[in-house]
Image: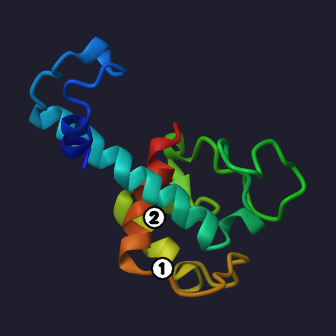
Amino acid sequence: YATWVARQHVGSPLIDGGGVPGPVTPEDSAAAAADSVELRGRAAFIAAGCLGCHAMVGTPTAGLTALQGPNLSHFGSRLRLAAGVLDNTDENLARWLRTPEDVKSGSLMKLPRPLTQDEVTALVAYLRAHQ
């Protein structure tokens, strides 16, 4: 997608004075893909109702303190998750997001609906990006 967007701007007087952008490198493509997954994660965070319980920087709940769940603004820098039950790895986070009750009996985290695998993958990237 980023390559397509860049090509749309070639010769535009509004973009870089009408210059032709340089070639897109694999690193640029990887960064754009990561950004895309994180953006999908943010959308999933909002659509799945996570905002109902969790504060997160960059969302409408940023700075709120009276929510039931923990503030997730610096989730990526945490060593443990699920109230200390699991190491904070991508695999454990995905498992926790899919079935919190199976990971920790009596968990207060209730999902309004099951998450799709794509949502789980995107949420893992989104949460991991918040250092």
Residue in front for this viewpoint, 4 or 73: 4
Residue position for label 1? 98
Which mark is drawn over residue 117? none
Q: Earlier in the sequence, mark 1 or mark 2?
A: 2
Q: Quadrant of residue 67?
A: bottom right
Compared to 66, does 11 lie above or below?
above
Left or right? Give the position of 32 relative to 39: left
The type of residue carrying mark 2 is Leu
Q: Residue furthest top?
A: 17
Q: Residue at x 36, y 55 (%)?
A: 37
The type of residue carrying mark 1 is Arg
Q: Residues within 10 Å of mark 2 (few under 14, many from 20)?
A: many
* Residue 129 shows in this picture: yes
The percent position of residue 7, horizontal first and vertical second, equals 18, 37
The percent position of residue 3, horizontal first and vertical second, equals 18, 41
Q: Residues within 10 Å of mark 1 (few under 14, many from 20)?
A: some
The percent position of residue 55, horizontal first and vertical second, equals 73, 52
Compared to 113, does 23 lie above or below?
above
Q: Residue at x 10, y 37 (%)?
A: 26
Residue position for label 2? 93
Classify mark 1: helix, strand or loop.
helix
Left or right? Give the position of 49 relative to 33: right
Compared to 83, does 60 lie above or below?
above
Q: How many marks?
A: 2
Coloured how? rainbow
The percent position of residue 66, horizontal first and vertical second, equals 90, 56
| Disc 1 from disc 2: Cα separation | 9 Å
Q: Quadrant of residue 49?
A: bottom right
Q: Residue at x 67, y 42 (%)?
A: 57
Mark 1 in CB contact with mark 2 (< 8 angstroms):
no
Left or right? Give the position of 46 relative to 31: right
